[in-house]
Image (cartoon, helix red, strand yellow):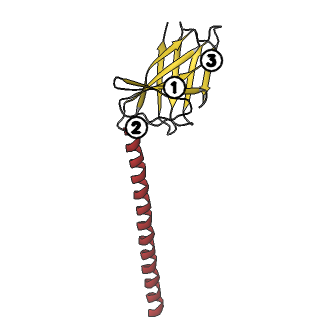
Amino acid sequence: MGFGVVAAGAIMLALTLITVAILGSMLYTVMMNTAKEVLGQSTHLESVTFKIASIIYNTTLNELFINITNVGQESIIPYVNTEIIVDYIDETGLRRVDVLHYNEWYFNRLIIGNSSYNIPSKVFVEVPPGAILEVKTSPTSPIDVSQPIIVIVVLDNGMKSEYVSNTG
């Protein structure tokens, strides 16, 4: 082997190492940016929390009122993709699970401190921290109030809250 072959091999090795270093640096940068985005989103989701504070069932009108409290640090704006799941036993003894989409439930009122604001239909509201949003819906069948009622609210962003009540 001559000097030219050794020099060419050394140059090829150096170029390969430089290419690997550049690709590794690019991969590291992409992974760090992805990690920052994911951590930033999880931090945002941690500051957006809500809970179902209570439910009230009106047996006469077959209406269910769900009180949702914003216990997070940021406002919540429930949109059309928010779903409400009501799991209950009806008056005939059958178990029912209603998955209620927008137009099957409505915003009824917003309570901020000692003030209550009625919400017209087809209007979206921003729920500031500490406020209570009352949602109104009608189950598909009258509820047997001597049995537990399970209500789950799932917001557009995937955040959810569950409430189990025995109103009897």
Residue 3, quarter of the rendered image: bottom left
Which residue is pictured at 59% across the width and 13% down the height?
A: 62
Which of the numbered marks, if any, corresponds to residue 96?
3
Up the image or down, 64 lies above or below 77; here it is above
Say what secondary structure mark 1 lies in: strand
Residue 127, quarter of the rendered image: top left
Query: Image check: 137 left or right of 34?
Result: right
Where residue 59 sits in the image (x, y, percent)?
56, 9
Looking at numbered disc 2 in the image, what kind of residue is underneath it? Ser
- Rate crowding at label 1 as few (under 14), some (14 to 19) or many (20 or more) other CA atoms within 10 Å: some
Q: Which residue is mark 2?
A: 75
Nearer to us in this view, 86 or 55 = 55
Which of the numbered marks, if any, corresponds to residue 168?
none
Query: Image check: 94 left or right of 147?
Result: right
Where residue 37 sits in the image (x, y, percent)?
42, 52
Say what secondary structure mark 2 lies in: loop
Looking at numbered disc 1 in the image, what kind of residue is underneath it? Ile
Q: Which residue is mark 1?
A: 152
- Mark 2 against mark 1, which lies toward the viewer? 2
